[in-house]
Image (spheres, grey):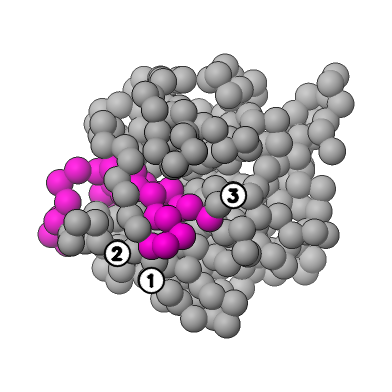
Amino acid sequence: MARAADAPIIPPGARVEKLWGEGEFTEGPAHGPDGCIYFSDIGNRIMKYDPSTGKTTEYRKPSGRANGLDFDPQGRLVACEGANTGGNRRITRTEKDGKIRVLAEKFAGKRFNSPNDLTIDTQGRIYFTDPRYVGEEPRELKQESVYRIDPNGKVTRIIVEVEKPNGIILSPDMKTLYLAENNPTGKRLLLAYPLKEDGSVGPKKMLYDFGKDRGIDGMCVDASGNIYATAGTGKTAGVVIFTPEGKKLGFIPTPEVPSNCVFGGKDRKTLYITAGKSLYRIKLNQPGFAVYWPEGN
């Protein structure tokens, strides 16, 4: 159910609530089949927060330095495993029986840099970013790019003209791919690409320039197609809400530097935010969107 036309996205007086704060560096929240929120603690584990009990437990350890997470249309957890000590530099899927399946770890015979974030379309195609921020492993790929993994396992490089691709998300109609260009020493942009039926993209459009401020890390979208982007630091740290055209609609400040966000809750109106060492949430008036959303959760 969409919000009333006269209701603001952020309810008056709403503030973020801290749910857990014992991580090393939290990232990549995803809404699971059981209604729980799965998120990465990049200290090398995946955590699970259960809204029904308020408890946070370890789901997978070690995680291969998992970062971005998402559930595919069949409700299976897909993870970007990054670089640095213990990092596997690959994309994996956790099958229903708990086994970890490697979906991709190389392009043109060369190991990925450090898979960072991903999004999945209604056909089960996985789009992921491959920058390198940390890790001393020798790089085999000079270009930091965006790739697509098709259901048959084929890996295609679809975006190359960026410095450091980070957060990535699809519009609800699957016709636009949003990408965060987030180079700490370069461009910090919100970009949009028209997504073609074959999974390739058209010419990019710059929607927003963060200038010298910290750019976007992770993103999610609501049912109306608005973009929720984690960005900023200090007084600017929080979730910036943009229209699909890049106009600012609102801002949710966070106590720690935010990394990513996802909608959850039975009514889809709870925004969960990973930030610093913690997991937060805030109740909104607008429902979120996800390719996979189990009934009742």
Q: Are marks 3 and 1 in contact (CB under 8 Å)?
A: no
Q: Amino acid at mark 1?
A: Val
Up-down relation of residue 293 to residue 143 (above or below) = below
Q: Which residues are magenta?
A: 124-153
Q: CA distance from mark 3 to mark 1?
A: 20 Å
Question: Where residue 105 is drawn, which disc sits there?
Answer: 2
Q: Which mark is residue 102?
A: 1
Q: For residue 115, which quarter of the picture?
A: bottom left
Would you say residue 78 is visible in this rendering?
yes
Residue 277, horizontal then vertical, whole percent: 50, 56
Q: Is residue 191 magenta?
A: no
**Relative image position of residue 64 (x, y in whole percent):** 37, 70
Q: Earlier in the sequence, mark 3 or mark 1?
A: 1
For the residue marked with disc 2, what is the amino acid? Answer: Glu
Q: Is residue 101 above or below residue 263?
A: below
> Which quadrant holds residue 183?
top left
In this picture, is 193 found above or below 120? above
**Residue matched to label 3:** 122
Quadrant that contains the N terminus: top right
Residue name at image x 31 percent, y 68 percent = 88
Q: Main secondary structure of the magenta part?
A: loop
In the image, residue 42 sits, relative to residue 162, either above or below, namely below
Q: Secondary structure at mark 2?
A: loop
Q: CA distance from mark 2 to mark 1?
A: 7 Å
Q: Amino acid at mark 3?
A: Thr
Image location of residue 67, percent across then percent down: 43, 57
Residue 141 sits inside the magenta stretch: yes
Residue 91 rendering spot, x and y as whole percentages = 39, 62
Discs 3/2, front: 3
Residue located 39% across and 38% down the image: 200
Give the CA distance from mark 3 to mark 2: 23 Å
* Mark 2–mark 1 CB contact (< 8 Å): yes
